[in-house]
Structures are given as structure tokens and as C-alpha cells.
Image: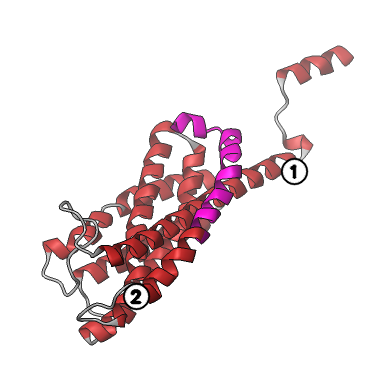
Amino acid sequence: MLSYFSNPARFEAFARWASPLALLVLFGCLAFGIPMGLYFSPEDYQQGHTVRIMYVHVPAAIMAELVFGFIALMSLTAFVWRHTLADACARAAAGPGAIFAALTLITGSVWGRPTWGTWWVWDARLTSMLILFLTYIGYIAVWQMGTDENKSARLARIVGLVGFINVPIVKFSVDWWNTLHQPASLLRADGPTIHSSMLWPLGLMALAYIALFSWFVLSGVRTSIYEKQIARRAQPLASRPIKPEQMAAGDQNG
């Protein structure tokens, strides 16, 4: 599978129909998930309508972790199998991942104000998510800091792999330490503890986030492929390597 999609032409052909499909899934899930979450799902017996922030916050938090896991996987793939499109996938995923992490922090603060009485505490979950957000920013900066793309790619792979260490810390921080943040209620070994009236819209919003991320990555990699094709075509003729058959033809003409 990896070797098949490492071919830019095959990937571009796949992305050509997969990108519109991702948008279709995105808008379909939002069309049902938003009204179900904001209007038709019940209030929480303790938090009231404030709990509706969950339909934005929880999927964003899950995606912030999953996306960096994706970056780490693509970084490992690029290191081991030298697939250049793996680097392109990781690079395209960084922007959406940073947005998901920022959205998690912002909505978490908004949710924490009425729930905890403060916008921010140096809680284990909040602090580790902040570190994850800063890691995203650092990863993006690595790609932008140098003119040599190969060196930037190697350094970005290292950041992607080392930064992944923080992902399980974010996930299990509520279990390892005594924190204000509530324990996991969705991704649990014994199954979700959320009522189905809340679980369905939450699932739809999570699927919408996945579709949005897929569209970003597919579009980003397609753009990277097109940019490299344009750069090759724009390369001055004098700087292009001369093929052996062209040399032979030149000798014969001479």
C-alpha cells in the first residue's frame, strides 16, 4: 500500500476523487452534527448548556493527538523507506494539527471558566496539550527555516518522531496524575460512558473533523506535487543533466 501510493501519479489520481469525497463527508456530517449537538442533544445535569462546547472541543483534542501520530508515522516511513510523499503528507498535516491543538486550548479555556472558575490552570492535560501545540509550531518552523529542503526534511522527521513522545502523555495524563480535567469518557477500554443522545452528535462531529483533515492533507500533497512539476519544467535548460542518448546524438551530428 505504501509503495503503491509513493508514486506521485498514483497518489494524484487517488486524491483527485478522494478530495471531493472528503468535502462531501465533511458537509454531510456538519449538516447533521451541528443541529444535533447544539439544539437537540440534552443538557448536562451539572453543566447545563455549557456541555455543548464538548462537540467542538473533544473532536479537536482527539484530532490534535491523532494528527501528530500521523506525522510521526509518515516521518518514520520517510526515514526507513525514503518515500518522498511521506514527507509531503507529514508537512501537509502539520497546519491542520496545529489548528486542532489551538482549538482544543481555546475551547478548553472557555469550557473551564464556568466549570472550574478559571480560564487556565497548569493542569497536566492542559500543559501537555500546550506543549503539543508548541511542538506543532516548531515542526512547521523547521520546514520554513532552511533553503535546503532535504536538510529540512531530515530535521522535521526527527522532530516528528521525538515530539510523538508527548502524545501518550496527553492521552493518559488524566490517569497518571491527579488533575482537574475529567477522566476519559469516550476512548476507553470498557467503551464510552456518554449517553447515546450525546454520543451520536459527538461521533458525527469527530467524523467531520477527520474528513476536514483528510481534505487538507490530500490537497496539500497535490499542491506539493504540482509545485515540484512546475519547478522541474521551469528549470533552465543549461542546468538540466544531459542524458547519455543526447550526448551520443550530439557526437553523431558533429
The residue at 32%/71% (across/down) is 54
Residue 148: in sight, yes or no?
A: no
The residue at 78%/36% (across/down) is 237
Which segment is the magenta one?
Answer: 1-27
Query: Measured from the top left, where is residue 220 in percent x and y?
Result: 56, 51
Q: Which residue is mark 2?
A: 53
Query: Measured from the top left, where is residue 159 in percent x and y?
Result: 37, 52
Image quarter in which the C terminus is found: top right
Main SS category, magenta section: helix
Out of 95 and 21, give the one closest to the viewer.
Answer: 21
Q: Relative to residue 112, is residue 148 drawn left or right?
A: right
Query: The residue tagged with tag 2: helix, strand or loop?
Result: helix
Q: Earlier in the sequence, mark 2 or mark 1?
A: 2
**Res 115 quadrant in image:** bottom left
Q: Relative to residue 156, is residue 232 drawn left or right?
A: right
Image quarter in which the N terminus is found: top left
Q: Which residue is mark 1?
A: 234
Rendered position, 56 above or below 86: below
Query: Measured from the top left, where is residue 19 in percent x and y?
Result: 56, 49
**Res 118 quadrant in image:** bottom left
The residue at 41%/43% (across/down) is 74
The residue at 13%/62% (across/down) is 175
Identified by mark 1, the residue type is: Ala
Out of 135 and 225, give the one closest to the viewer.
Answer: 225
